[in-house]
Image (cartoon, grey):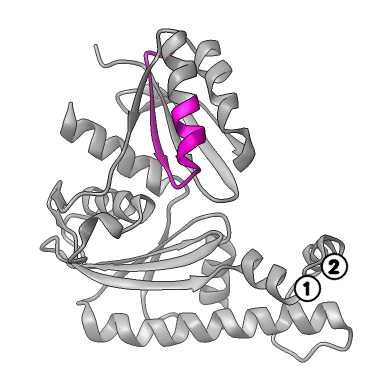
Amino acid sequence: MPSSRLEVDVGNTRIKWRYGNAGHWCARGVLVSDELLALTPLAIQYQVEVVAIASVANLDLLRQLEQDLAQCGIGFWRAQTQQEAAGVRNAYQQWQRLGVDRWLALLAAKRAYPQRDVAILQAGSAVTLDLLRQDGAHLGGYIFPGRQMRRRALLGNTHQIHMLQERQPELMPGVVTEACVLNAEMVLELGMLNQVEQVLLQQLSNPLWIFAGGDGQSLLEFYRQQRQPRLETSWHDELVLDGLMVQWGEEQ
């Protein structure tokens, strides 16, 4: 029987996890990024055999987590970026430098849509976009500052950021500072999406645009609402975790 495991996606701001085996997930949840060591009691609670993790977190914390798990008799497996795997070829010449979250998203997209050219947009602390041809060739991508990163750079004040979260964006000019910031954010994001759309149409054949990440759903809504979209779109909430499962299966 496949080992029961806790699959974990550790980003810069949050940690997503799910528990189960062979693709049958019994529980899932979210932690904040500084709660990495809380995964040990979680693994004990669910009596897992191994914690499989994709992480951009502090290496010292990861080592501490591995030690804590080992003391409890629980295995630790960490996903790594590869040059080629599961039908996908990394575009980076220094292939190790591609973020593991982007790599795993490529693996997941190839597994989910083997006969399609795809573009993968993950919107978290940073917004990353990667292009993948049907034949498995990764064509590279883009990295943009994410929504929270832009807000912190502009405002640097958590109270003001909270006020933004209470408003709905629109394309019209704002008449109070919070609306000016939020509406400009929407203008910037739509401009980004529209410009990238042109690149995708040039580089890929009938591409599917996959959206993921904490702010991915709202970006997808922006794209769909502005006008008749020129690209087919899809939403995937656990793309990195799905890629983690692909790499785990390839290496076992």
Residue ID for mark 1 = 155
Q: Is residue 199 above or below residue 148?
A: below
Answer yes or no: do the residues labelled 2 and 1 have beta carbons within 8 Å? yes
Q: Residue 22's quadrant in the figure?
A: top left
Neighbour class for label 1 at 10 Å: few (<14), some, many (≥20)? few
Checking the image for residue 183, the label placed there is: none
Q: Image point 62% across, 33% down: which residue?
A: 35
Residue 132 part of the magenta-drawn span: no
Question: Range of the magenta residues?
Answer: 48-64
Q: Nearer the viewer, mark 2 or mark 1?
A: 1
The location of residue 101, given as percent across then percent down, is 38, 51
Q: Which quarter of the rendering shows the N terminus? A: top left
Q: Secondary structure at mark 2?
A: helix
* Residue type at the position of mark 1: Leu
Q: Image point 85% across, 65% down: which residue?
A: 163
**Residue placed most toward the observer, 170 or 88:** 88
In the shown orientation, is residue 77 left or right of residue 164?
Answer: left
Residue 227 appearing in the image:
no
The location of residue 151, given as percent across then percent down, is 70, 71
Q: How far apart are the two marked residues, 2 and 1, measured between alpha carbons? A: 7 Å
Q: Residue furthest bottom?
A: 173
Q: Which numbered disc, 2 or 1, marks the residue that appears first in the sequence? A: 1
Q: Is residue 145 above or below residue 114?
A: below
* Residue type at the position of mark 2: Gln
Q: Image point 28% across, 43% down: which residue?
A: 80
The location of residue 40, given as percent across then percent down, is 53, 19
Residue 81 appearing in the image:
yes
Checking the image for residue 160, the label placed there is: 2
In the shown orientation, is residue 82 left or right of residue 32?
Answer: left
